[in-house]
Amino acid sequence: MKIYNISIKNAGYVYCKSCHYSAHDILSESYTFSEGINMLIGEIDSGNWAISYLLSMYRHRPKDFVLFEQPKVAVNDKMISLKEFSKASCYMDKTDPLFSSTKSVKKQIKQGLAHSKLDYSYDDIKNLFELDSQRVERSLNKVENEVFRAMAAIGLSYNKEVFCFPWLSHKLFEYYHGNLTILLEILEKLGKIVIIPVGMPATETTESMEQQ
């Protein structure tokens, strides 16, 4: 199913986890996301990570969620269950069960294509995400700062439509910036929905604290 827009309303508490951070966050409002890059700027517990985590990890880690009601999710303006929706999303972190810590990126892409029957070859996806010919033979733990492009390649091979990132501090975002910029451009051109929560720059955080 091609996804053009998502809207979701929910409230509750979420214990968000990634390979870099963990934090308690709050769901307390309605969210709407559309095709392309949806960058959410805010601190680690500002609600941005919670919604990204909810849309991608609820079915895998239900114990991380305390929800006050059943999430109301609409895809392309039609109501859908969160469980059904989550089949189209992936969490761009190695904690997502979609990603193996032992198999090579190459093998995972091939397995994804065998599962989805997409009209792509392995080489099509490797070239699309500009994956290094040597690193693609390694596991995700050994591809260094190419890791997000490798995960996205695997996600696409499984026909994922929504790519949900964990919260990234501004410093960490800048560390991956070159690879992330390339990746976000690729996903946008493919017409995917990307949800990426990012921390505020240190200068903005300091100014905000001083104003308080």
Image (spheres, rainbow, N blue to C red):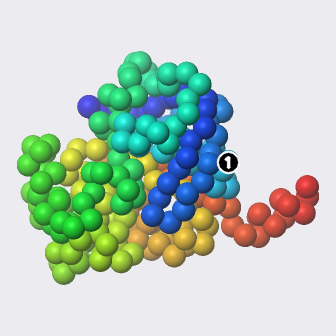
Q: Is residue 39 visible?
A: no
User: Most extreme residue toward the front, as rendered?
Assistant: 63
- Residue at image position (35%, 69%) is 147
> Mark 1 falls on what kind of element?
loop
Quadrant containing the C terminus is bottom right
Give the image location of residue 120, x and y in percent. Answer: 12, 52
Q: Is residue 137 visible?
A: yes
Q: Which residue is mark 1?
A: 46
Kind of residue at badge 1: Ser
Give the image location of residue 46, x and y in percent. Answer: 67, 48
- Residue at image position (46%, 25%) is 73
Label 1: few (<14), some (14–19) or many (≥20) C-alpha neighbours in 10 Å: some
| Horizontal side of residue 210 vs 161, given as left or right | right
Q: Quadrant of residue 1?
A: top left
Give the image location of residue 14, x and y in percent. Answer: 56, 42
- Residue at image position (63%, 60%) is 199
